[in-house]
Amino acid sequence: MLRGLRELAAKLGDKDIAFFMLKGDPTDTLPQLVEQTGAGLLVTDFSPLRVGRQWRTQVAERLPGSTVMVEVDAHNVVPCWVVSNKRETAARTIRPKVHKALPEFLVPFPATPTAPAAWARTPGLLQPEPVDWEGLLREVLARGADVPEVVWCVPGEAAARAALDGPAGFLSPARLALYAAKRNDPNAQALSNMSPYLHYGQIAPARAALEAAKHRARYKEAVEGFLEELVVRRELADNFCQFTPDYDNISCAAAWARESLDLHRSDPRPYSYTRAQWEEGRTHDELWNACQLEMVHLGKMHGFMRMYWAKKILEWTASPEDAIELAIYLNDKYELDGRDPNGYVGVMWS
């Protein structure tokens, strides 16, 4: 995220737009910045997750009375609150609602307007402090030293665009053909690998969808499969978290699922592991270990393998509650797209 923000700050500077790096609790730092700059408008991105919603509410409560706060949903193509006003039960129920709204929301991006005046050359405006990017990176890397830094995924908007539609990007003919034929094969390396960029906002799902749609005539199966994952499944995950406050707790499961889990609480557990053994991929199962170590070192795992990985955690832990807690812990610590609605939905589904 920091390396991507570094690129963003430079691009904003080229357009005479100020970039403020705030450290600390956003419920303190954001209202302070609004007051110091005299901002009349604060725009925030939508999140269906608990912490993001709490931040949004607390920031809104602390803003000056003259400041307007607006929430937009750039996390999805169709805003979550437009798609549905209730929890949807499956992709089949949300898909027609998403498709119906796409013509209104999946439209070309307008050009970025030029700032009416350069912030840095306008007298009386609060100026941002210089950012010590190298120092920040050293600090963050030291704090998270137990999680290896991922090197295969180059961060930033430019890298995101290259990963999508560059010469060797996902939308190249060879990659689209491979995706159509092998996307369900964990050994084929056929996936788009766009999820980290989407998670950190370094490319918008709408941008990726618009570019992918240009190839639909020639690669219909691949493009439609990609758009299903990019648009419909992401919307479904956000919908689940938005309308399910306990999205990371067994209490959110359907009654039949909870009953089934309860029936098997006393089943023998032939294997039991410490948290360190789980994290280090030291179980009796080589396939599970490979899944875990791929996640630790690459920050990603094929969707089919995520299902196997999560189901085996349920099989080898003392209770469903322990399984959910462990799976979410591992997912959020090691996955590049951890702490995301897709991760919580994936764990609960498995």
Image (tube, rainbow, N blue to C red):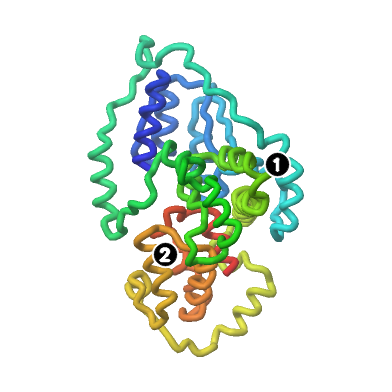
- Quadrant position of residue 282: bottom left
| Left or right position of 93 against 333 | right
- Quadrant of the frame with the C terminus: bottom right
The Cα–Cα distance between marks 1 and 2, rounded to whole angstroms, is 33 Å
What's under tag 2, amino acid-wise?
A: Leu
Query: Residue 123: which disc?
Result: none
Query: In the image, is residue 164 above or below residue 307?
Result: above
Q: Position of residue 54 (x, y in %)?
A: 51, 45
Query: Residue 82: which disc?
Result: 1
Answer whether residue 333 is visible to the viewer in this image: no
- Which residue is depicted at the point 56% across and 60% down? 183
Q: Position of residue 121 (x, y in %)?
A: 36, 11
Going from N to C along the chain, the mark reached first, 1 or 2, is: 1
Kindly indicate whether the residue at mark 2 contacts the one at mark 1 (C-beta within 8 angstroms): no
The secondary structure type at the circle numbered 1 is helix
- Label 2, on which residue? 330
Q: How many marks?
A: 2
- Which residue is depicted at the point 70% across and 41% down? 82
Q: Residue furthest top?
A: 123
Question: In this view of the protein, which residue sits in the foreground, 252 or 220?
Answer: 220
- Which residue is depicted at the point 62% across and 64% down? 252
- Which residue is depicted at the point 35% across and 16% down? 120
What's under tag 1, amino acid-wise?
A: Val
Query: In the image, is residue 299 above or below residue 306?
Result: above
| Left or right position of 89 against 125 | right
- Quadrant of the frame with the N terminus: top left
Answer whether residue 167 is visible to the viewer in this image: yes
